[in-house]
Amino acid sequence: MAYDSLAAFRMDGHAAIVTGGAQNIGAGIARAFAGAGARVMIADLDGAKAAATAANIAAETGRDVRGMACDVTREAEIQALVAATVAAFGGLSTLVNNVGWGGVNPDPLAVTEAQMLDSYKLNTISAYRMTAACVPHLLQAKNPAVINSGSFSSAVPAYDILAYATAKAALNQMMVSLAHALAKKVRVNSVLIGTVITAGYASAGIDAATQERMMHPDTLTGRPGTPEDVANAMLWLASPAGGWISGQTINVHGGGSVVRLFGH
């Protein structure tokens, strides 16, 4: 039998939850997992869109993909999501805390306490509570993993999106702490995502001119990312191929952190 180097990237037998999976990066992650053989529950604030996206991915991949409404800032809805997933798939092996959003803060010294707290609840606390709800089931699974959709803005100055970037920085610390707390039991990692052009940018208040500049970023690759770029990294971390990776923040941003001194 010929050696298949891609076999370790298969997710047959895995059951995953992807929060915020109805569109954009989350939908790309769900599609990649299902295409690799996983059963996937797409959770989203928009339950109808989650169900529609799930139906499309199921038709495309032939896998069991479902969608349901879930507000990840509400504990009762988190518990209902986890219970529904375990009932549907017989277990749970993979959690992707993909939910996240942040608006522009034109004046970084005028961000209100409510804005800071709301961002922290959505981008940090929701991932903590989702993880806590899933761990009892993850401990019973083979190759259990938690992956967070982080942000490159959490690791560089980002004063124009201060509330969001600060909350994502907290997510990095929470990830590594949980990775150590769950050592030898559940792998926990974060993907620090760079500029991926989606409909979400317009809703975050970024004007058309700025969006056009973002289409030609000054990065090593010279292009913005796609949902598939992020999904492929997530697939590696969730699959057996990523079995030796835990407690890490993986940069997926087109080489955006390198300063080139000579204009090349």
Image: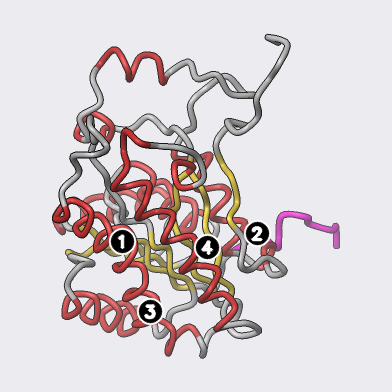
Give the residue at mark 3.
89
Mark closer to the chain start, 4 or 1: 4
Give the residue at mark 2.
9
Mark closer to the chain start, 2 or 4: 2
The quadrant of the rendering that contains the N terminus is bottom right
Q: Indicate the position of residue 3 as horizontal and vertical percent values.
A: 84, 58
Q: Nearer the viewer, residue 25 or 54?
A: 25
Q: Which mark is residue 42?
A: 1
What range of the chain is rendered magenta?
Answer: 1-10
Q: Is residue 78 above or below residue 218?
A: below
The quadrant of the rendering that contains the C terminus is top right
Residue at 25% across, 54% down: 119
Residue lying furthest top: 263
Residue contact between numbered discs 2 and 4, judged by CB atoms under 8 Å: no
- Circle 4 SS class: loop
Residue contact between numbered discs 4 and 1, judged by CB atoms under 8 Å: no
Give the residue at mark 4.
37
